[in-house]
């Protein structure tokens, strides 16, 4: 960072991050980061990768310490370190959140679904069907 003194410009309600950065997040998750009073990063409510990029960038450009960024963004320090490592190894693409949910193939293959339908049509209980087909 330069030796310029921080400008005392930050929008009303902004969370100060270190001496030179400020964060404003709306109720819908949209956010803006100001560095020395100027808009530096912004994202909409659905853009988690953009939010992560802003946090990582503040650390990488030296605008604030990792602890200050983690506190300002209301995340854990380890979470921020994970984001920084992901950005270092895979670039911006590394900041895209992983898909949540099952990671392997579904146990409900078409054959299993057909078996469940047959057993339920025959009057078997859900517990009996689950036990019979192994799900």
Image (cartoon, helix red, strand yellow):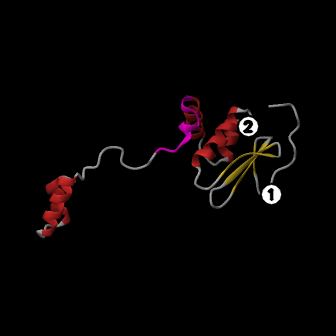
| Mark earlier in primary sequence (1, 2) | 1
What residue sits 16% from the left and 56% below the top? 131
**Does residue 129 lie above or below 102 as drawn?**
below
Q: Magenta stretch?
A: 89-98
Q: Is residue 90 magenta?
A: yes
- Name the quadrant of the N terminus: top right
Q: Report if the CB atoms under discs 1 and 2 are less than 8 Å apart.
A: no
| Residue drawn at 80 percent across, 54 percent down | 11
Q: Is residue 129 left or right of residue 58?
A: left
Label of residue 64 in the image: 2
On the image, the x and y values in percent for residue 10 come to 82, 51
- The quadrant in which residue 84 appears is top right
- Residue 16 picture location, percent across and down: 76, 47
- List the single residue furthest toward the left: 122
Q: Secondary structure at mark 1?
A: loop
Which part of the image, by quadrant, shows the C terminus? bottom left
Residue 31 horizontal/vertical position (percent): 68, 53
Q: Separation of disc 1 and disc 2 at Cα?
A: 20 Å
Q: Is residue 135 left or right of residue 5?
A: left
Quarter-wise, where is residue 87 in the image? top right
Quick check: is 41 in the magenta stretch?
A: no
Q: Which residue is rendered at x = 18% and y = 54% of the image?
A: 112
Q: Which residue is mark 1?
A: 12
Q: Is residue 115 above or below residue 54?
A: below
Residue 129 in the image: x percent, y percent?
A: 16, 61
Of residues 101 and 113, the one nearer the viewer is: 113
Mark 1 crowdedness (10 Å alpha carbons): few <14, some 14-19, many ≥20: few
């Amino acid at each position: 960072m330069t030796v310029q003194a921080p400008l005392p410009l930050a929008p009303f309600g902004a969370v100060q991050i270190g001496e030179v950065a400020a964060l404003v997040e709306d109720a819908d998750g949209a956010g803006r980061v100001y560095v020395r009073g100027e808009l530096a990063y912004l994202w909409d409510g659905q853009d988690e990768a953009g939010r992560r990029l802003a946090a990582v960038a503040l650390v990488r450009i030296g605008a604030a310490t990792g602890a200050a960024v983690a506190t300002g963004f209301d995340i854990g320090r380890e979470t921020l370190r994970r984001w920084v490592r992901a950005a270092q190894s895979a670039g911006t693409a590394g900041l895209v959140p992983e898909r949540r949910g099952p990671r392997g193939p579904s146990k409900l293959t078409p054959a299993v679904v057909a078996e469940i339908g047959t057993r339920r049509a025959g009057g078997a209980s859900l517990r009996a069907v689950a036990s019979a087909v192994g799900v």
